[in-house]
Image (tube, grey):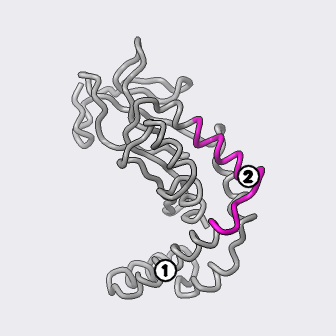
């Protein structure tokens, strides 16, 4: 369901993506997904932006709107069919089958039951997921800049993360949200940033 919620909220065919793109707040580098690992699951968005705060605010507003008004039925069906099709295509890959079966084993589910699972997910489930999980209280935003103040890398916004942007005047080249501002203590070469 997390994957479908991510696509409905942030996918390239979503109203939010189209609106942000038309406003010039995101470019084709923007995207999002839902990830699960042992002990954690998160929805994230990332990419380059000239105004990360505006993008973050728009994501929160759109999640709240969907939670309040519900998911459009036709759009929900299209996203569910696309997700189902992607899972079905994955059965053509030996590597994908091996990874999926292994993940299912360690996470305690049978991944080959995905047709039943997809059929059981409702638009209300997605709206509830967004209402519960995509909130300011559960979100963390990260923005990175080179010392030359050019956007770098790609980054995660969660609802763990943020969107790259130029730093506001008086800010350092690496900050988390206002409430968690910090500077990196050492070079972060993996991100292509050196202080």
Q: Which residue is mark 2?
A: 67
Tell me if I can see residue 40 in this picture: no
- Please tell me whether mark 1 sits on a helix, a strand or a loop: helix
Does 87 sit above or below residue 11? below
Where residue 48 appears, x then y in whole percent?
A: 37, 39
Front position in the image: 75 or 157: 75
Image quadrant containing the C terminus: top left
Where residue 155 appears, x then y in whole percent?
A: 39, 43
Residue under the point 60% across and 60% down: 5
Q: Is residue 58 shown in magenta?
A: yes
Residue under the point 42% across and 18% down: 168
Front position in the image: 131 or 101: 131
- How many numbered dots are placed on residues in this image? 2
Q: State the residue lying farthest toward the front.
A: 22
Q: Residues within 10 Å of mark 1 (few under 14, many from 20)?
A: few
Q: Which residue is mark 1?
A: 85
Q: Residues within 10 Å of mark 2 (few under 14, many from 20)?
A: many
Where residue 79 appears, x then y in whole percent?
A: 57, 69
Does 52 sit above or below residue 195? below
Where residue 10 appears, x then y in whole percent?
A: 53, 53
Horizontal side, residue 59 vs residue 23: left or right: right
The answer to which image quadrant residue 41 occupies is: bottom right
The answer to which image quadrant residue 95 occupies is: bottom left
Horizontal side, residue 22 vs residue 77: left or right: left
Magenta region: which residues?
57-75
Query: Which circle's residue, 1 or 2, is located before the other in the chain?
Result: 2
Residue under the point 58% across and 63% down: 2
Front position in the image: 85 or 45: 85
Main SS of residues in magenta: helix
Residue under the point 77% across and 52% down: 69
């Amino acid at each position: 369901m997390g994957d479908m919620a991510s696509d409905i909220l942030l996918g390239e065919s979503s109203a939010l993506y189209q609106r942000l793109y038309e406003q010039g707040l995101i470019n084709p580098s923007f995207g999002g997904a839902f990830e699960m690992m042992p002990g954690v699951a998160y929805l994230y968005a990332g990419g380059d932006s000239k105004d990360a705060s505006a993008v973050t605010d728009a994501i929160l507003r759109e999640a709240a709107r969907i939670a309040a008004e519900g998911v459009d039925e036709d759009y929900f069906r299209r996203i569910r069919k696309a997700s189902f099709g992607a899972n079905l295509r994955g059965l053509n890959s030996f590597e994908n089958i091996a990874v999926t079966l292994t993940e299912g084993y360690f996470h305690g589910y049978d991944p080959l039951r995905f047709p039943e699972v997809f059929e059981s997910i409702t638009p209300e489930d997605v709206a509830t997921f967004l209402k519960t999980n995509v909130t300011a209280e559960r979100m963390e935003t990260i923005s990175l800049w080179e010392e030359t103040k050019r956007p770098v890398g790609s980054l995660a916004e969660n609802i763990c993360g943020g969107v790259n942007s130029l730093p506001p005047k008086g800010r350092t080249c690496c900050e988390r949200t206002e409430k968690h501002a910090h500077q990196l203590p050492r070079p972060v070469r993996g991100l292509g940033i050196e202080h």
